[in-house]
């Protein structure tokens, strides 16, 4: 039998009220049922009757019980489950916590993409469904068996996948590594997240390309990092700015996306890659090389990563399946020194107890299959076709209104809008016209730029989509 705790700092009447309240909520005292008299309860709990009077008074004020002076006390038939009294204030909870919300422009675009099925979407930074090797992946899926004993306790990632990735990295990225230096993650986004959470602390300074990938920008802000800008021109980031930033702000890490950068599409020249690596090695500064797009190279050979030249192990290399095969599999990876991998694996174990085995099995089989390289070749050709279609449509529909460089790889075209426009107004007008793009300011650029992802809309929708954007721009200019 429960009794109030006389040593507790909570007053006796409050303890009794709390106990009765939970019994009412749990149905021990159902709605409309009588409660014991004040005298009986006082005896039962070994307290003064006035303490029970106070407890009942508290429950009455909360609407849990009803009683008239001199009559029985009853559990309220109406108010005992009154939500206003008992529902947590979720809106307050939803505003707290460490994660900042996504930027309003991005939420607005996402809502519209979900709401309007006829929208022509140049905003989602993904491949269209027809550019994913759907048939092959389904075939592998059908022939894949789930084995409960396999992989469940391997937080570093499914070993056959790590071995397949080591081979892939040697063949296609000139990175010589082994399965033990690779961590499989849930897309490169999780790699970036683990790096910020495990290797950096709130208040640390990092240098990021400006403009750069928006989901990493909000994540860095949520992690409390101080971000300093590395300007990007048509040949990528300018390495000479690093030394000054490092001296002035004690930069702890450098984040770059050197090959067909998201959003600008720029390719960091080999000279600059070399210079970047030399500067970072001299300063003992780690580079995070985010490289999800290099295999899409259109006109040049696939550009080598910074990591391939990295004798001093300055680079944490991040890759992903998302932009070259299937974003839905959520397969990403990090190549890093052993101590870093161990630290990240330990954190990942706390975070998600390791990653689902099925997509890892599929990715391992697919990457080793004879279909993988022909798929990449097909992907490149299709991306070139889509890029050309977008460029031609822009020339035709928005001649004199926009300026852009033709990207030579990747999924995106970065477009300067020549007349002065308000990003938000243009986005609203475009969504009304039925086309979506991402305003450049989302990536930290000055206003008046847009990122157009040619990889996502269907080929035949590209020209009509640009017509809609052109109508939106004219509407805003008028
Ligand atoms: C440069 C860059 N890094 C990382 C990501 C995250 O991709 P994922 O987590 O799907 O691998 C993206 C996605 O758009 C990206 O563009």
Image (spheres, rainbow, N blue to C red):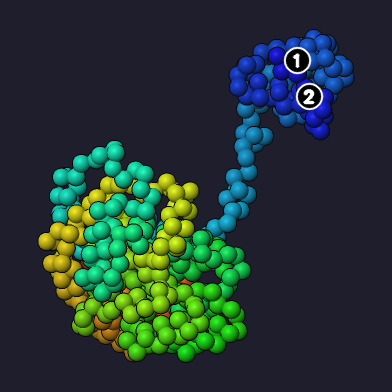
Determine the image quadrant of residue 39.
top right
At a point 64% along the width and 34% down the height, the residue shown is: 86
CB contact under 8 Å: marks 2 and 1:
no
50, 161: nearer the viewer: 161
When the figure is inspected, residue 227 is found, relative to residue 22, above or below; the finding is below
The answer to whether residue 114 is above or below residue 147 is below
Q: Is residue 113 left or right of residue 5?
A: left
> Local crowd at mark 2 within 10 Å, few (<14), some, or many (≥20)?
few
Q: Residue at x 28, y 79 (%)?
A: 304
> In the rendering, at what x and y percent does residue 271 appear?
34, 89
Q: Position of residue 464 (x, y in %)?
A: 25, 72
At which x and y percent is residue 436?
Answer: 36, 68
The residue wearing badge 1 is 73
Residue 281 in percent (x, y) is at: 45, 81
Q: Which mark is residue 5?
A: 2
Near-viewer residue (406 or 333): 333
362 over 241 or under it: above or below: above
Q: Nearer the viewer, mark 2 or mark 1?
A: 2
**Residue for point 44% across, 49% down:** 349
Q: Can residue 414 be seen at all in this image of the molecule?
A: no
Instruction: Please give the name of the residue rendered at 21% of the width and 81% of the height, measured from the top-left corner.
Output: 301
Q: Is residue 204 visible?
A: yes
Q: Secondary structure at mark 1?
A: strand
């Amino acid at each position: 039998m429960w009794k109030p705790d006389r040593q507790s700092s909570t007053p006796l009447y409050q303890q009794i009220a709390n106990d009765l309240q939970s019994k009412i909520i749990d149905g021990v005292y159902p709605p409309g049922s009588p409660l014991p008299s004040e005298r009986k309860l006082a005896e039962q709990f070994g307290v003064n009757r006035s303490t029970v009077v106070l407890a009942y008074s508290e429950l009455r004020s909360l609407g849990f019980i009803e009683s008239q002076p001199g009559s029985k006390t009853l559990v309220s038939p109406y108010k005992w489950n009154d939500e206003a009294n008992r529902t947590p204030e979720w809106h307050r909870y939803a505003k707290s916590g460490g994660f900042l919300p996504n930027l309003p422009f991005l939420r607005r675009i996402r809502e519209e993409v979900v709401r309007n099925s006829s929208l022509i979407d140049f905003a989602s930074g993904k491949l269209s469904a027809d550019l994913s090797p759907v048939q092959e992946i389904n075939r592998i899926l059908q022939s894949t068996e789930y084995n409960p004993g396999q992989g469940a306790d391997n937080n570093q990632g499914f070993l056959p996948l790590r071995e397949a990735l080591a081979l892939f990295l040697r063949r296609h990225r000139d990175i010589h590594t082994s399965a033990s230096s690779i961590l499989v993650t849930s897309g490169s986004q999780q790699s970036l997240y683990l790096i910020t959470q495990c290797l950096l602390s709130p208040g640390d300074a990092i240098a990021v390309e400006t403009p750069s990938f928006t989901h990493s920008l909000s994540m860095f802000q949520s992690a409390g990092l101080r971000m300093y800008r590395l300007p990007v021109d048509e040949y990528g980031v300018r390495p000479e700015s690093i030394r000054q930033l490092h001296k002035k702000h004690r930069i702890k890490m450098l984040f770059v996306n050197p090959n067909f950068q998201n959003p600008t599409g720029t390719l960091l020249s080999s000279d600059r890659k070399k210079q970047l690596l030399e500067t970072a090695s001299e300063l003992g500064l780690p580079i995070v090389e985010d490289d999800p797009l290099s295999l899409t190279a259109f006109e040049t050979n696939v550009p080598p990563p910074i990591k391939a030249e990295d004798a001093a192990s300055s680079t944490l290399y991040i890759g992903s399946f998302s932009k070259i095969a299937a974003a839905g599999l959520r397969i990403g990876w990090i190549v890093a020194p052993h101590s870093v991998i161990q630290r990240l694996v330990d954190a990942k174990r706390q975070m998600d107890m390791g990653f689902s085995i099925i997509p890892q099995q599929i990715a391992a089989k697919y990457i080793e299959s004879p279909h993988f390289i022909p798929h990449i070749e097909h992907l490149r050709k299709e991306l070139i076709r889509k890029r050309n279609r977008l460029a031609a449509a822009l020339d035709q529909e928005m001649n004199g209104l926009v300026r852009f460089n033709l990207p030579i790889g990747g999924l995106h075209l970065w477009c300067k809008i020549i007349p002065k426009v308000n990003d938000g107004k243009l986005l609203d007008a475009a969504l009304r016209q039925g086309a979506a793009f991402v305003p450049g300011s989302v990536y930290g650029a000055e206003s008046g730029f847009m990122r157009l992802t040619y990889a996502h809309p269907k080929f035949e929708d590209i020209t009509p989509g640009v017509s809609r954007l052109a109508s939106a721009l004219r509407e805003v200019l008028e």
